[in-house]
Amino acid sequence: MQKWEKIVDHLLQEAIGNGDISHLPGAGKPLRLDNNSHTPPELRAAHKILDDHNVIPDWIADREALDQTESKLWRRLLHKAARYQADRRAAIKAERAKLETKIEGDWKRFKSGFLEATDRYNRALLEHNLTLPQGIAHKPQLRGEEMIERALQANAGKADNTN
């Protein structure tokens, strides 16, 4: 706990102990934490109605869907990169050139499909970013080639540690 937090906590405990705050409105009742002071006053009623009915704005739902897609792409890439590197090492060790060629071809096809998937994701992301309210940060696009390199490096490090 930071120094100022300790001071504030001490002062609050002291005030409660002295009974100095028992006369305030809402004393003894739970705090209402749903009041968002960052929401413009003219939008508070609309936000409250949406919140009360568990309705979220489209751009938030879209961002959640994009986050899930990005996570799936990463998991799939990491799995495939690990499998590719393990299979390739095994084929090289066994001196099976035909198998190594097949593994390389499969990896090349996967990379092509992965790059197409990141392009589709980036198109959806661009549409999403264009619909964001002012002041909401844009999500950056995925860089498929860089992701592939990072996945291969991550798995190469793991393979080096296991040998």
Image: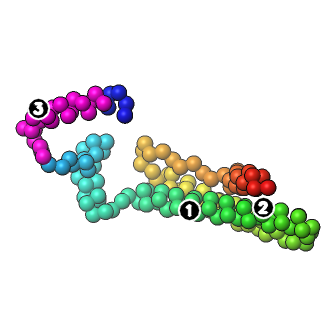
Residue at image coords 43%, 56%: 59
Residue at image coords 42%, 48%: 133
In the image as oriented, which residue stretches furthest toward the front?
163
In the image as oriented, which residue stretches furthest toward the left?
23
Residue identifier under label 3? 18
Whether residue 37 appears in this view of the structure is yes
Please identify the quarter of the rendering in which residue 98 is found: bottom right
Q: Earlier in the sequence, mark 2 or mark 3?
A: 3
Q: Distance between the residues labelled 2 and 3?
A: 68 Å
Q: Which of marks 1 and 3 is nearer the N terminus?
A: 3
Find residue 95 and report its horizontal and vertical position in percent: 92, 67
Q: Which of 18 and 141 is in front in this view?
A: 18
For numbered disc 2, what is the local secondary structure? Answer: helix
Is residue 26 magenta-colored?
yes
Q: Residues within 10 Å of mark 1 (few under 14, many from 20)?
A: some
- How is the rendered protein coloured? rainbow
- Closer to the observer: label 2 or label 1? 2
- Closer to the observer: label 1 or label 3? 3
Tag count: 3
Dots 2 and 1: beta carbons under 8 Å? no
In which quadrant is the N terminus drawn? top left
* Residue type beneath disc 2: Gln
Residue at image coords 26%, 33%: 9
In the shown orientation, is residue 75 left or right of residue 93? Answer: left
Please identify the quarter of the rendering in which residue 40 is found: top left
For numbered disc 3, what is the local secondary structure? Answer: helix
In which quadrant is the C terminus drawn? bottom right
- Residue 85 got which mark? 2
Residue identifier under label 1? 69
